[in-house]
Image (cartoon, rainbow, N blue to C red):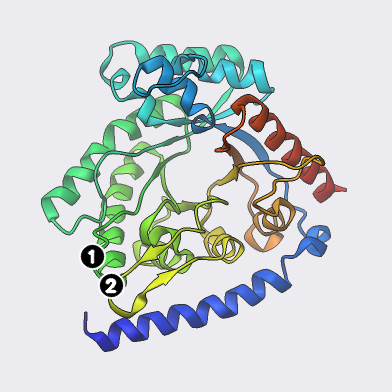
Amino acid sequence: MHHYMQRRSFFQAAGIQAAGAAAASCVFSNQALAAAAKPFEISLAQWSLNRNFFSFLGLRNSSAEKLDPQDFAGIAKREFGIDAVEYVNQFYMEAVRKPGYLEDLKKKAADAGVTNVLIMCDREGNLGDPDFKQRITAVRNHIKWLEWAQALGCHSIRVNAASDPKLSYDQQLELAADGLRRLCEIADTYDVNVIVENHGGLSSHGRWLASVMQMVDHDRCGTLPDFGNFRRVVRGEGEFGELDYDRYLGTYELMPYAKGASAKSYAFDDEGNETTIDFRRIMSIVCHPKFNFSGHVGIEYEGQSDSFEGIKKTKALLEKIRGELSA
């Protein structure tokens, strides 16, 4: 891309960011809770207990209690009273090849009375890889998770819109959109959605990811706004520079395409409020009638304290806010 185009992309993005930030700040503030009347369900993201599952699999040195990934649905219901779960493919990379494992996983969820919501997919290649063969390989690598999602009754697989960070803003946009479009056309045959999380690189730039959604232009394609993954340094080529993206603006920009939301949490004060993220403000954006969202908000605790306590505190806060929204 020419230097002029890079400069123009930057200022266009900056202009949109300024306008969007004003809207997100003024329209969706804590005082806007009364207008945010849409309900939501609570699910549990398996990553919240990643130390426990990695410990069981022997993939990381951890003193955390070992938990079998096949028991995840039962753990969610028994320990936390949560009846909807979001799986992480990293805990099933070997299991995906084991005969009968998927059927057992499905049965355990059904026996626990738990709904399977989605599968988070990582380590399957870059859907925006500039090398065409690698991009197609990445698309094909996700097919086995589409098969799992269909069998489990999940509505979506969550993927990453990753490209080559050395390329320009627009080049990465076009490549990511191409890979996602190809995967969505395959996902259509499984009746499963393909949703993208702001999860590093340019995907943590809300406007960029929204632009990817517009370019893909497929009903199966959507977003999974993560409350914690916007405040990352985004590196782009040339004058795009670095950006510490506002989480409330990013959520506002991704909600028109959202088929879920990820309630990232780290730490809590004595009153049960998350200390990094203003949950009331961000949930007033997620639940605002403007976006007509009524899906699952997945708890994804990433703090350094006890994971079980972190999950319980996140759930309590979401339930409290849900009550305030419907009051």
Residue at the spot of label 2: 237
Q: Which mark is residue 117?
A: none
- The amino acid at mark 1 is Lys
Residue farthest along the right direction in this orientation = 327
Q: Nearer the viewer, residue 105 or 155?
A: 105
Query: Which element is circle 1 on?
Result: loop
Q: Are marks 1 and 2 in contact (CB under 8 Å)?
A: yes
Residue at left offset 76%, top offset 42%:
269
Q: Nearer the viewer, residue 159 or 68?
A: 68
- Please, is residue 232 above or below residue 211 in the view? above
Q: Quadrant of the N terminus?
A: bottom left
Picture quadrant of residue 122: top left
Picture quadrant of residue 235: bottom left
Residue 119 x/y as whole percent: 43, 34
Q: Earlier in the sequence, mark 1 or mark 2?
A: 1
- The amino acid at mark 2 is Glu
Q: Nearer the viewer, residue 294 or 76?
A: 76
Residue 225 x/y as whole percent: 53, 52
Residue 288 x/y as whole percent: 70, 59
Q: CA distance from mark 1 to mark 2?
A: 6 Å
- Please, is residue 210 above or below residue 146 in the view? below
Query: Which element is circle 2 on?
Result: loop
Q: What is the number of callouts on the image?
A: 2
Residue at left offset 47%, top offset 25%:
51
- Please, is residue 186 above or below residue 72 in the view? below
Residue at the spot of label 1: 166
Residue 177 x/y as whole percent: 31, 60
Residue at left offset 51%, top offset 79%:
16
Horizontal side of 116 relative to 175 (left or right) equals: right
